[in-house]
Image (cartoon, grey):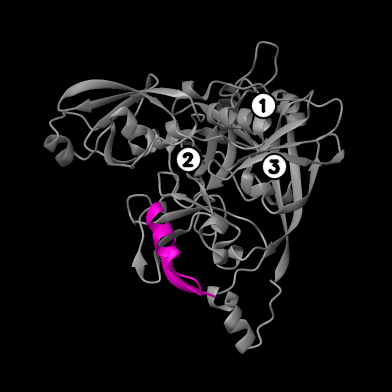
Amino acid sequence: MVLGLILSQAASAQIVLPNGDTPSLAPLIESVSPAVVNIATSGTVEIQTNPLLNDPFFQRFFDVPQPRQQRQVQSLGSGVIVDARRGFILTNHHVIANADQITVGLDDGRELEATVIGSDSETDLAVIQVDAKSLSALPFANSDELRVGDYTIAIGNPFGLDHTVTTGVVSGLERSLPGSGGARLQQFIQTDASINPGNSGGALINLRGELIGINTAILSRGGGNIGIGFAIPINMAAEVMDQLIDYGAVRRGVLGVRAQNLTPDIAAAFGVDHLDGALVAQVASGSAAEAAGLEPGDIIVKINDRPIRDATAMTNTIGLLRVGETADVVAIRDGLRKTFSIKIGDPSEGEVSGEDLHPLLSGALFNELDERSPLFGAVRGVLVTRVEPRTRAAQYLQPGDVVTSINRQPIDSIELMQERLATTNTELLLNIQRGERAFFVLVR
């Protein structure tokens, strides 16, 4: 009798639709699944070695083989068809990085070769393209309207398991995740929908079947899901996607400031009664910000009518503006609000070729250190912006490196770098800051 009572109570607790069916996500999943694809890549990467092994003298003296070693790499990920007519697929940069071959698997069993249209490591986004008919694309939601508690559905290819579906809610908004594949611009959606390796690049959708984000990362100690996953908001992804399709890259401008978050003590010292805003700590010489009149101590609270909550929000907002675009920046100075009209600068302006500086630097491009580098404000030096593969510079330099001294003489600008190199002919002793690591390299 007790069992019968339990079953009776369970039956009365069932949710039944007016037509007699029970609620199910199956119809929704069936409609969106054709727009979510599996991505398999293969390629080669160079094995990183100690910079000392790249020194020609060291190689000859110790008979070290000169050809650089490579290894084969393969990866699995996911992607979302965003333009069915043109065959554009949105995924993560880290899914297709170093890929020589990209194979896309569709829900109907077709396998297609894909080409890279553009990729952006700073947002960890990429666009690839397939040549095929009868494709399905997902419509975009407005991710700015998301609220904590909204339902989410993640679809992807975790561990190679095709079109796996998990559900959850929005657990947080505008999250930052240190070490997330090198992405500098971050304003992640946090969700407890299960995201695992292989989900990267897959779809995070709402209950309307609209794309709200691109699944990107998980927070985990062992590599598995613990209920903390992250997705790039589709509004941010769409802005990057448009530039990747138009130009093959993101024409990202720079403002020329380094900012920090306000604390209660610092806010009180500046005479403000709130913690919202980005406190300008440094203005780069010759930058767009300096030309417009921004100064250290200004508190940026709005850019183009978008509220700036903290330094990360400022970096994200500026990082999505195009070169030459005018930004209206509202800042608090001495308790008063001031508006600055700033034309976003081109980071390639002032770029100098290594060949023009010194023959031993052939293959690298250098520029002033600015907010593109996480080392801006932490060290003084010159930024390495690009390194051509299989060149002299590629033996000891990487994009993002900061050269802090030459022959034990510090540098903090391109002009000073040119002066130091003008008196050097035979060899260079470079002090290089790479992330949190610093080392010397002797180049002959």
Residue type at mark 3 is Ser
Q: Nearer the viewer, residue 18 or 330?
A: 330
How far apart are labels 3 and 2 at the CA level? Answer: 21 Å
Q: Element at badge 2?
A: loop
Residue type at mark 2 is Leu
Residue 132: x, y in percent?
Answer: 86, 31
How far apart are labels 1 and 2 at the CA level? Answer: 33 Å
**Sequence-wise, which precedes: disc 3 or disc 2?**
3
Q: Which residue is the site of mark 1?
A: 25
How far apart are labels 1 and 3 at the CA level? Answer: 21 Å
Residue 78 marker? 3
Residue 87: x, y in percent?
Answer: 78, 30
Q: Is residue 101 left or right of residue 263?
A: right
Q: Which residue is the site of mark 2?
A: 185
**Residue at x-position 50% and y-position 71%:** 425
**Residue at x-position 49% and y-position 40%:** 349
Number of residues whose C-alpha sits closer than 10 Å to that of mark 3, classed few (under 14), some (14–19) or many (20 or more): many
Residue 32: x, y in percent?
Answer: 72, 27
Q: Are marks 1 and 3 in contact (CB under 8 Å)?
A: no
Number of residue marks = 3
Number of residues whose C-alpha sits closer than 10 Å to that of mark 1, classed few (under 14), some (14–19) or many (20 or more): few
Residue type at mark 1 is Leu
Assess whether residue 443 is covered by the magenta stretch. yes
Image quadrant holding the C terminus, namely: bottom right
The magenta region covers: 415-444
